[in-house]
Amino acid sequence: MDLLAQMDTFVRVVEMGSLSGAARRTRQSLAAVSRQMTALEAELGGALLIRTTRKLTVTDAGRAFHERCLRVLAEVDGARQSVRGDRAMRGRLVVSAPVSLGIARAEALFGLTNAHPSLSIDLRLEDRVVDLVAEGVDVAIRVGITPPDSGVYVAHTLRPVRRVIVAAPGYLAKHGRPRHPSTLASHTALLHLPAAGEADTWVLRGENGEDVRVPMKGAMRSNALVVLRDLAIAGHGVAMVADFLVTDALASGSLERVLPTWEGPRATAYAVHPVALRASAKVRALVERMRIAW
């Protein structure tokens, strides 16, 4: 049995946490995966896995070997792609992104497929933290979520994300323009429903570093920031949304910044992928495309 193939299967076993999971991931039989692990341990002369009827445990030697396998497999993949060149930009790339971000940047991803006709992208929009390995995701775009502290994943910083307050000119003409965060409480708010934390309170920071908490009255709540943006454009209230969602609306004048010297808590956008894809030309191209799109 090819040692590289055994190493790749071992990495899948560790990532999936079981032989059966690795078998499904690699489309092999459970017996084939088991034989590979037995042969690999015999080749190395030591135990990598402790298998019982209830669970699988990676030994200390297995964890050390796993880290080396990741590096070796990444180098091998990079060597292959250095020869293939543009031919490596083919096949399918599965991308997971927050709903509003995915809607706002879908055209940028489509531009990548236009540049490489043999490449296709499955864009999954979901406001949750996905398990990349278990769910078959190549790259996850995450905003405001700390990247996993693990040697199994690589996180690329894309850009900082600012949360700005906006409203339509017509709304401001009718209801007045707030001059201080405290006066926001009297306005109709379009509120974001976060996965955790408060929806009815805006935390704002001024240019001078002052922090203010403002209780807001919500006319509409949504977990999709793009919905709040569109309602704000329609003149239904004030909204605090990510800056990348309102770039065009601010430029066209359909929205205006409210309290431009104040903004919500900043976050950072990352692209996260398994370390095994570190040398993938497709993944590198997607990360760069997302950076340019912002």
Image (spheres, rainbow, N blue to C red):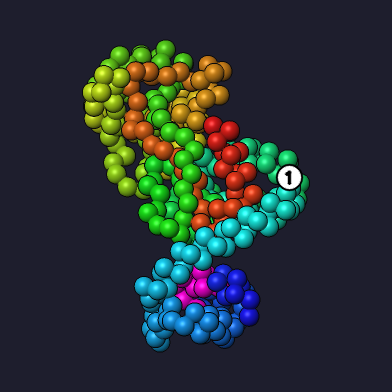
- Relative to 152, residue 215 above or below: above
- Relative to 147, residue 31 above or below: below
**Residue 208: percent from left, percent from top:** 26, 19
Residue that numbered label 1 is attached to: 116
- Relative to 180, residue 52 above or below: below
Q: How many marks?
A: 1
Q: Which residues are magenta?
A: 9-19
**Residue 125: percent from left, percent from top:** 53, 49
Q: On the rendered image, what quadrant is the C terminus found in? A: top right
Left-right relation of 12 to 48: right
- Relative to 204, residue 137 above or below: below
- At horizontal 42% and vertical 81% (from top left) the residue drawn is 47
Is there any visible trace of residue 211 in the rendered image? yes
- At horizontal 25% and vertical 23% (from top left) the residue drawn is 209
**Nearest the eye: 199 or 45:** 45
Is there any visible trace of residue 126 in the rendered image? no
What secondary structure is the stretch in magenta mostly built from?
Answer: helix
What crowding class fits label 1: few (fewer than 14 Cα within 10 Å), some (14-19), or many (20 or more)?
some
**Residue 138: percent from left, percent from top:** 56, 55
Q: Secondary structure at mark 1?
A: loop
Q: Is 153 included in the stretch rendered in magenta?
A: no
Q: On the rendered image, what quadrant is the N terminus found in? A: bottom right
Q: Is 16 included in the stretch rendered in magenta?
A: yes
**Nearest the eye: 258 or 267:** 267
